[in-house]
Image (cartoon, grey):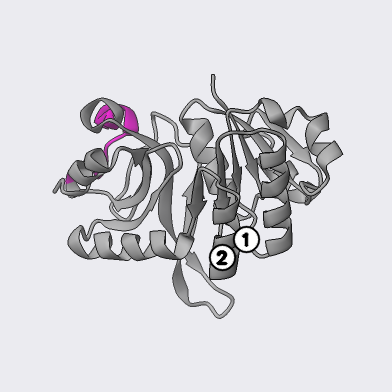
């Protein structure tokens, strides 16, 4: 089984870690924030709280043995660059790192890593695809060569379970979560729809009209699913 380290467990890193786990990858999740590590420990193979700028700490968990490392640290540019530099120094061949500004991107290029992740460009692509495929709300390429997308369920799927639909066999996609709109009442007594994410969907879960599926698969497979009426 492939082992991939995900460093930085913000929203982006958390999503990457869970998605890789759903693809039968052994994930080593790392963050300096113990609370974030606690939140993800039940979803990944190993979750560790440590400072990724500390070479000794990284070596203590055997990070040099992973098949790939993804540096998802966003706001702290210094931590992002130093972590990436240490991974390169330790001989990890496949390194993916997030860039949040042009200068950081240029520095990462000089390190000759596998890929620089630019979320702004990925989101621009997502907007373009949402205009041509209205059922796709969000679309993002993953380092695994697959795509993750949020799709409004087709009318035919309403009232049917995931087991009954068997989307993996029909479309070669994996359902990693279901986003639901739950009727609720706010503090003022106004009726609202509260967004709830079921990130551990079961085969018996039944889809409702307002649900969205969050799926992972090849781009062409997701395209076929999104065109389903």
Residue 73 point in image, percent of width and height: 65, 55
Q: Which mark is residue 209?
A: none
In the structure shown, which secondary structural element does the residue marked by tag 2 occupy? loop
Would you say residue 154 sits in the magenta stretch? no
The residue that appears at 46% across and 30% down in the rendered structure is 23
For the record, the magenta segment spans: 156-167
Tell me if label 2 and label 1 are in contact, CB under 8 Å.
Answer: yes
Examine the rendering and report whether any part of residue 194 can be seen. no
Would you say residue 161 sits in the magenta stretch? yes
Callout 2 crowding tier (Cα within 10 Å): few <14, some 14–19, many ≥20? some
What is the quadrant of residue 225 in the picture? top left
| Among the two numbered marks 2 and 1 on one chain, the one whose residue lies closer to the N terminus | 1
Outermost residue toward the top?
Answer: 1
What is the quadrant of residue 136 in the picture? bottom left
Examine the rendering and report whether any part of residue 62 can be seen. yes
Is the residue 22 above or below the residue 116 in the image? above
Q: Residue 74 carries which label?
A: 1
In the image, 8 versus 209, the foreground residue is 8
Residue 134 point in image, percent of width and height: 22, 61
The residue that appears at 52% across and 77% down in the rendered structure is 189
In the structure shown, which secondary structural element does the residue marked by tag 1 occupy? loop
Callout 1 crowding tier (Cα within 10 Å): few <14, some 14–19, many ≥20? some
């Amino acid at each position: 089984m492939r082992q991939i380290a995900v460093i930085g467990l913000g929203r982006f890193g958390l999503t990457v870690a869970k998605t890789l786990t759903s693809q039968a990858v052994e994930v080593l999740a790392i963050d300096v924030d113990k609370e974030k590590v606690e939140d993800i420990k039940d979803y990944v193979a190993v979750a560790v709280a440590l400072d990724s700028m500390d070479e000794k700490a990284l070596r203590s968990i055997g990070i040099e043995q992973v098949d790939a490392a993804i540096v998802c640290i966003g706001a702290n540019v210094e931590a992002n660059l130093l972590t990436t530099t240490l991974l390169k120094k330790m001989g990890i061949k496949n390194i993916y790192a997030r860039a949040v500004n042009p200068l950081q991107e240029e520095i990462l290029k000089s390190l000759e890593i596998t890929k620089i992740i630019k979320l702004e460009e990925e989101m621009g692509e997502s907007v373009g695809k949402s205009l041509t495929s209205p059922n796709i709300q969000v679309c993002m390429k993953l380092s695994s060569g697959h795509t993750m997308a949020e799709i409004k369920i087709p009318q035919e799927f309403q009232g049917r379970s995931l087991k009954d639909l068997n989307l993996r066999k029909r479309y070669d996609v994996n359902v990693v979560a279901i986003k639901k709109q739950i009727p609720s009442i706010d503090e003022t007594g106004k009726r609202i729809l509260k967004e709830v994410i079921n990130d551990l969907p079961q085969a018996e879960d039944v889809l409702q009209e307002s649900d969205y599926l969050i799926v992972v698969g090849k781009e062409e497979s997701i395209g076929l699913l999104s065109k389903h009426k």
